[in-house]
Amino acid sequence: MKSTLKTILIAALSALVTLVAYDHFSGEKIEIVENEKANLIPTTYSFNSSKVAGEMTDFTIAAEKTVNAVVHVKNTSVKKNNVPSWFSNLYGDDFDEKRIGTGSGVIVSPDGIIITNYHVIENASEIEITSNKNKTYQAEIIGSDPNTDLAVLKIKTKESLPFIPFGDSEIARIGEWVLAVGNPFNLNSTVTAGIISAKSRDLNDMDGKNQSFIQTDAAVNVGNSGGALVNTDGELIGINTAISSITGGFVGYSFAVPSNIVRKVFEDLIEYGNVQKGLLGVAGSALNTELAEKFEVDETQGFLIGEVVEGMGAYQAGLKIGDIIKKVDGVKINTFSDLTGYLSTKRPDEKVEVYYNRDGNDKKITVTLKKTNTVQFLGMSVKNLNQEQKEYFDLDQGVIINELNNRRLYRYGIDEGFVILEINNKKIEEVADVEAIDLKSLNSLLFLKPNGERERIIFE
């Protein structure tokens, strides 16, 4: 014990002597710096320490609500082969070619009204509907609109069918979860999930169609056309219509007609037999940096008016060339499809609030939408008859040619000032009837000449 204590004391004394000697001979002093702040680099990141997921999403409820209301559509069409009449009389029509196409449809009312794409039932001689419960029905076409690629069908049934209620596509947001329900590759009742990746998408600026699609990354393939795009509440917010693909299969983008447009077209076809379009009566371009510099305006977003059609709502309300439309009824207008997409949900005689910029000043005006009074058809510009023209021709219906750029019709003796009375043996009341005509089905035109003579042209 004494030996151990002695050893510890010697070690402590040696350490003390060493420290004193180092301090004496080195000449260096140790300074303790207090309260000096370090140079910190500020950061902007943050993190969630709650250990809770940002969103818990369940698709099962929406799928259960909708899967039984989406049906399989089978289109049987017949292509007539050009064989001599004597040959057909001897051997029958066995040489006619039957074609079968398939797609999807959405039941929107319990009594069997179905919405699908026009291209799904185009040229159909027979339409067969198969439900998710494998019941088969024959369908009739109530109406169709090639411009929006929509068609309305009806099946006869005594039972109350499951259906999908319309949602409001205007309030659907980019990034929102959606489900695509349909029958790709004849695989009935297929559900895929994705998000809304864009709105007001126009796939082709040169096709003359006012498209305003919802873009989604939910997988859509051949056979999905006419099927449902629904939100997580199981509400219909679109009809799946197209894909953008190099291979012909799904590569990440699909497009749906917004439900607000679908509902309006659906109601118009049932009530009027055609689509009632409410128009502002302006033409122009969506602004960008290049156009802003060209026209010397400060705005780079909005719709720049380049033409105001006389007699239409915009003209009567006082809109002018050079005005920049920024909003309509609170809907921001950044692209042409923003404007046409919203107006596609409106009818003639409805009023809209137009917010616009003129010479740097923001203004607001109320515009009454009107029917189109001029349409392009078969190389002709045709207009509704005014009162003076109706009295001259002694007519209460028909459209008049005010510009002709069709050489074939001109060689037949058709000219400006002629009135179109019938197309495909159907009376033409106004230009809306002309717009509803599918050029692929065109077979005859009946004209009234200014001298009172009538001439019918038959296309073979």
Image (cartoon, helix red, strand yellow):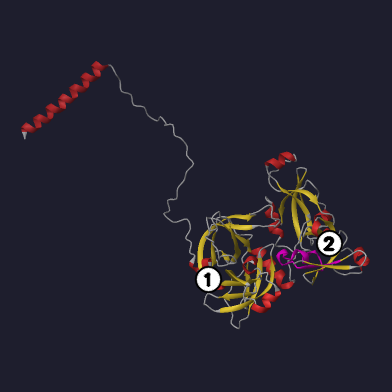
Tag 1, which secondary structure?
helix
* The C terminus sits in image quarter: bottom right
Residue density around tag 1, few if under 14, some if 14–19, many if 20 or more, within 10 Å:
many
- Vertical placement of residue 180 versus 9, above or below: below
* The N terminus sits in image quarter: top left
Tell me which amino acid carries mark 2: Tyr
Residue density around tag 2, few if under 14, some if 14–19, many if 20 or more, within 10 Å:
few
Residue at x 80%, y 56% (from the top left corner): 407
Tell me which amino acid carries mark 1: Val
User: In the drawing, does residue 295 fall left or right of residue 237?
Assistant: right
Looking at the picture, tell me which residue is in the foreground, 311 or 394. 394
Q: Earlier in the sequence, mark 1 or mark 2?
A: 1
Quadrant in the picture for residue 37: top left
Tag 2, which secondary structure?
loop
Q: CA distance from mark 1 to mark 2?
A: 54 Å
Give the x, y percent position of residue 204. 65, 53
Say which residue label 1 marks: 67
Say which residue label 2 marks: 412
Magenta span of residues: 428-447
Looking at the picture, tell me which residue is in the foreground, 295 or 62. 295
Looking at the picture, tell me which residue is in the foreground, 330 or 84. 84
